[in-house]
Image (tube, rainbow, N blue to C red):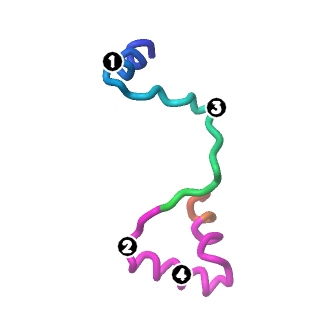
Amino acid sequence: MAEAVADLLASGEDIPAPLAEKHDSGEFRVRIPPEVHRALALQAAEQHVSLNRLASAKLAA
């Protein structure tokens, strides 16, 4: 790890915060093709849930 830190410093890059210190917001954006978006929106409508809830469930599975 010391070598990686030295390389980052030598190249002028910032050292990232350790994962244990990062706080995730619970949000992120994903780009998908329009046809996938439409298919997911239809599935969500058929299941009477939001697109967000459907996507969250699929990602958690």
User: Mark 1 or mark 4, which is nearer the start of the sequence?
Assistant: 1
Marks 3/1: CA–CA distance = 24 Å
15 sits left or right of 26 in the view: left
User: Mark 1 or mark 3, which is nearer the start of the sequence?
Assistant: 1
Q: Is residue 25 above or below residue 57?
A: above
Q: Disc 3 vs disc 2: Cβ atoms closer than 8 Å?
A: no
User: Mark 4 or mark 2, which is nearer the start of the sequence?
Assistant: 2
User: Mark 3 or mark 4, which is nearer the start of the sequence?
Assistant: 3
In-front residue for pair 6/20: 6
Residue that label 2 marks: 33
Marks 2/4: CA–CA distance = 12 Å
Crowd band around label 3 with a 10 angstrom C-alpha radius: few (<14), some (14–19), many (20+): few
User: Mark 2 or mark 3, which is nearer the start of the sequence?
Assistant: 3
- Residue type at mark 1 is Ala
Marks 3/2: CA–CA distance = 34 Å
What is the number of the mark on residue 10?
1
Farthest residue, direction top:
2
Of circles 4 and 1, the one toward us is 1
Crowd band around label 4 with a 10 angstrom C-alpha radius: few (<14), some (14–19), many (20+): some
- Residue type at mark 4 is Ala
Secondary structure, mark 1, is helix
Residue at 63% x, 65% y is 57
Position of residue 21 measured from the top left corner of the image (x, y, whole percent): 64, 31
Residue that label 3 marks: 21
Of circles 3 and 1, the one toward us is 1
